Amino acid sequence: MITEDRIREKLKEVKYPGFNRDIVSFGLIKQVWVEGDNVTVKVSLATRDPQIPDQIHREARAALESIEGIGQVHLEFDIKDPPQPAGGAGAQGLGTSSIPGIRKIVAVASGKGGVGKSTIAANLAVALSQTGASVGLCDCDLYGPSMALMFGSDEQLMANDRNEILPVEAHGLKVISMGFMLGDDAPAIVRGPLATRYTQQFLRQCAWGELDYLILDLPPGTGDIQLTIVQTVALDGAVVVTTPQEVALIDARKAVSMFQKVNVPILGIVENMAWFECEHGARYPIFGEGGGKAEAARLGVPLLAEIPIDIDTRARADAGTPVALLPAAENAISAAFHRLASSVAAAVER
């Protein structure tokens, strides 16, 4: 017997292009009508890429037509435009993003965990702030938040009289993180829909004020939080973090592909843990050598920075004082992060 539940279950076999999750889990199936053996499915998408609905249409039809005894299959697509990037076509050249008061929104992402993405995001935000820019940092990794520790604050999030979340201010930045809501040993036990709601609240119901840059520290991978973000705000670009080793580069390619499929510009790649330099000056490429540079060339995007493994960087992250706070003229790692900030600022302006 053909039922709505059976149709939805079958459609779970269809993945959103570039992502790991299926179109049902993403909430793209708005309605299912069953009349006898005939089925009509309404799908809602926010994309400007015509290949995405085409691919979903093909795969959804193939999945449904494989059900024994099914009759006619009709797929209706409701396709909307996602938010326009700042100053882009459709923004009337106003230079405003989809969050009022914020000029540029940049995502820092990685295909896998453990590559130091949050360290890059924190120090990038600090380095941008030290240029005189007003900067916010949103920790979008709900399950593994780290920015409360990295910025040395145990403040609790508060709300203003308009019921907007007030960011915590630390080291000259405005910071939002689930870590300000949970204790060090308290896990965030939230399922997909609730994670989506938290993410949207952090972005759209927060009193960010006037910012030159909002840096988003995304969770690793290509899941529902990433899709929520690209459909909630207009990103001006993404920075993809990897290590030189092939196992990390494989996942970095997936992150790049994900952003390309949802029309987010790739600002470039950061190769983290590029080498370890001992006190005698010898360099040891622990995770391989030149992988980030080669991958950036293959993808046709800039290599924004090569950041070495550094004990002081790790120690300062644990202590809540990011290494980019040090004068660039006195610390080579801080200088590398300030060069990265300059490259990112130039890329988003282009």
Image: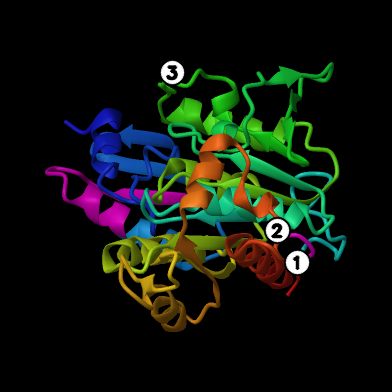
207 vs 23, nearest the viewer = 207
User: Residue sitting at 55 percent across and 32 percent down?
Assistant: 149
Q: Quadrant of the N terminus?
A: top left
18 vs 287, nearest the viewer = 287
Q: CA–CA distance between discs 1 and 3?
A: 41 Å
The mark found on residue 84 in the picture is: 2
- The amino acid on which the numbered mark 1 sits, given as a three-letter code, is Gly
Q: Residues within 10 Å of mark 3 (few under 14, many from 20)?
A: few
User: Dot 2 lies on which element?
Assistant: loop
Q: CA–CA distance between discs 3 and 2?
A: 37 Å
Give the total of numbered labels: 3
The reply to whether residue 80 is in sight is no
In reply to whether residue 319 is colored magenta, the answer given is: no
Percent from the top left, x then y, of residue 242? 42, 62
User: Residue sitting at 12 percent across and 44 percent down?
Assistant: 68
Check whether the beta carbons of the residues at disc 3 and disc 2 lie within 8 A of each other: no
In reply to whether residue 79 is colored magenta, the answer given is: yes
Q: Quadrant of the C terminus?
A: bottom right
- The picture quadrant where one finds residue 158 is top right
User: Dot 3 lies on which element?
Assistant: loop
- In the current view of this chain or complex, which residue is farthest to the left? 68
Q: Which residue is mark 1?
A: 88
